[in-house]
Amino acid sequence: MLPPNLSLVLLDRDGVINADSKDYIKVPDEWTPISGALEAIVQLQQHVNVAVCTNQSGIDRGLFSLDDLHAIHEKFQSALTSAGGSPISIYFCPHGPHSGCNCRKPRAGLLTTAITQFGGTPSSTLFAGDSPRDLAAAEAAGCLPVLLRTGNGTETLASAHPAPITFDDLSELTTSILAAKRQG
């Protein structure tokens, strides 16, 4: 199901790594990791490059500042290193849905930037998310789209045609990636 040649795993943030909120994650205290997500990232880091690609339109909407976003990401990075991992690159789009930018998912800008900076190729890259725009961004970038049922994933799966490659959560995806690497 998953190719053994994966060298880069890109992850959406809200709903994949941490609990999502319809009111946005605006301050570090609102950032809470999904059970097992940090440990899954730590395992992935031992075999592939891992980065985050996330829309953060709350900045454009005036709900939080760039400094707030950096503080949230500092909390994430600290939690990741406390779990035994290394800090990872985070690519984010601060623009709103009507900005027309290339970096906002479902466009491919964030993903192609990450792939280029890691020296990867789309065919050796997987992007895991929980929304239709995540799947569309992966397809636009030419990498493997994977849907996680965490966050908005269950609702996305109900409306997805055809059904994408799907896993319950980041832990289950990680198990599958590592199995594919052992078999490959």
Image (cartoon, rainbow, N blue to C red):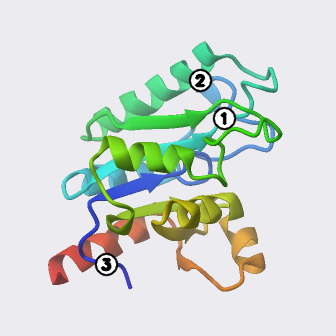
Q: Quadrant of residue 103?
A: top right
Q: Residue 90: x percent and y percent?
A: 45, 36
Q: Residue at x 72, y 78 (%)?
A: 160
Seen from the viewer's position, the closer of residues 38 and 135 is 135
Pointer 2 residue? 69
Residue shown at 82% from the left, 26% from the top: 61
Nearer-N-terminus badge (1/2):
1
Q: Earlier in the sequence, mark 1 or mark 3?
A: 3
Callout 1 amino acid: Gln
Asked if marks 1 and 2 touch (Cβ < 8 Å), the reply is yes
**Picture coordinates of residue 150 (x, y %)?**
61, 62
Gap between marks 2 and 3 measured at Cα = 34 Å
Within 10 Å of the Cα at label 1, are there few (<14), some (14-19), or many (20+) other Cα atoms? many
| Label 2 environment density (alpha carbons within 10 Å; few <14, some 14–19, many ≥20) | many
Query: Which tag, 2 or 3, sits closer to the chain's start?
Result: 3
The image shows residue 59 at horizontal and vertical percentages of: 72, 24
Q: Which residue is mark 1?
A: 56
Check disc 3 and give the amino acid type.
Pro
Query: Which residue occupies 76% across, 70% down?
Result: 155
Q: Which of the numbered marks, if any, corresponds to residue 3?
A: 3
Give the quadrant of residue 9: bottom left
Q: CA distance from mark 1 to mark 2?
A: 8 Å
Q: Residue at x 39, y 31 (%)?
A: 77
